[in-house]
Amino acid sequence: MREEKRMLGNYEVVNSIYIGDKEVVFGVDKSDKYPFLVSYCDCHNPLGVPWATESVGCDDYLEAMELFIQRVQSQIEQTKSELSKFTFDNTVFTKEHCIPDKRSSSIVGKVVVINAEPIRYEYQHPAFQLVLAEGGNGATGGRGNAVFGTCLATGEKSRWERYDVLGEIKPECMPAWAKEALAKIKAQQKENKQKNREER
């Protein structure tokens, strides 16, 4: 059974490296005036589908490959810079750091640990594991998997899957940076609630 070719327009993707927040893609279309394509590709759009950006067509293979490598290197540097902000211990959390997860119980309002194994290598870091669960069918112990929450280290709101939740972090395993971040998030939530009441 043949694997289906991955395409970007008429270009067949022959090389790709996903590093940091973007994938760098190298495509070939021998029938085009510019047979080699180098592009970024990500899913950060309302539809959540792969979207090519900053595409460059080229008729010189080595020039295109050089651009491909430059973009990969740029993504590596950007990701290193992003991770350098987290100066705390980078040992990942495991089940041993958690109160075991009972899928039928609610985790709303709790700090949970996201399993690092399914995360891409560059993001297997505790900064991306501790999440304040705030809602979703998966968070309430319902039938769904969606867990919406806020990443403690980055403050970004996102969606995780309940099957990726290892459990609630044990109080004695919660690091100082996470306690500080949680206090800031809760203070911000309280302030937002107060503003909403005043606007009514």
Image: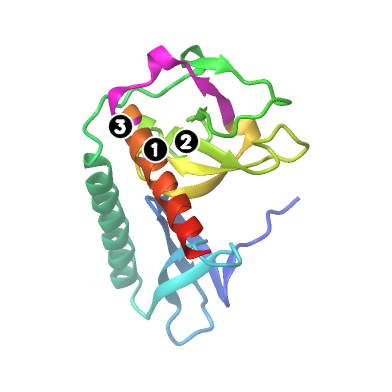
Q: Earlier in the sequence, mark 3 or mark 2?
A: 2
Q: Which residue is mark 2?
A: 131
Q: Nearer the viewer, mark 3 or mark 2?
A: 3
Q: Which mark is residue 180?
A: 3
Q: Residue at x 38, y 50 (%)?
A: 19
Q: CA distance from mark 1 to mark 2?
A: 6 Å
- Is 134 or 120 nearer to us in this picture? 134
Q: Earlier in the sequence, mark 1 or mark 3?
A: 1
Q: Amino acid at mark 2?
A: Val
Q: Amino acid at mark 1?
A: Leu
Compared to 184, does 199 lie above or below?
A: below
Q: Position of residue 35 (x, y in %)?
A: 45, 78
Q: SS class of the residue under badge 1?
A: loop
Q: Residue at x 75, y 36 (%)?
A: 142
Question: In screen coordinates, is 197 left or right of 40?
Answer: right
Q: Earlier in the sequence, mark 1 or mark 2?
A: 2
Q: Residue at x 41, y 75 (%)?
A: 55
Q: CA distance from mark 3 to mark 2?
A: 13 Å
Q: SS class of the residue under badge 2?
A: strand
Question: In screen coordinates, is 84 left or right of 143?
Answer: left
Do the CB atoms of the residues marked 1 and 2 lie less than 8 Å apart? yes
Q: Residue at x 50, y 84 (%)?
A: 32
Compared to 200, does 176 lie above or below?
A: above
- Is 83 or 103 nearer to us in this picture? 103
Q: Would you say residue 168 sits in the magenta stretch?
A: yes
Q: Position of residue 194 (x, y in %)?
A: 44, 52
Q: Which residue is mark 1?
A: 152
Q: Which residues are magenta?
A: 165-178
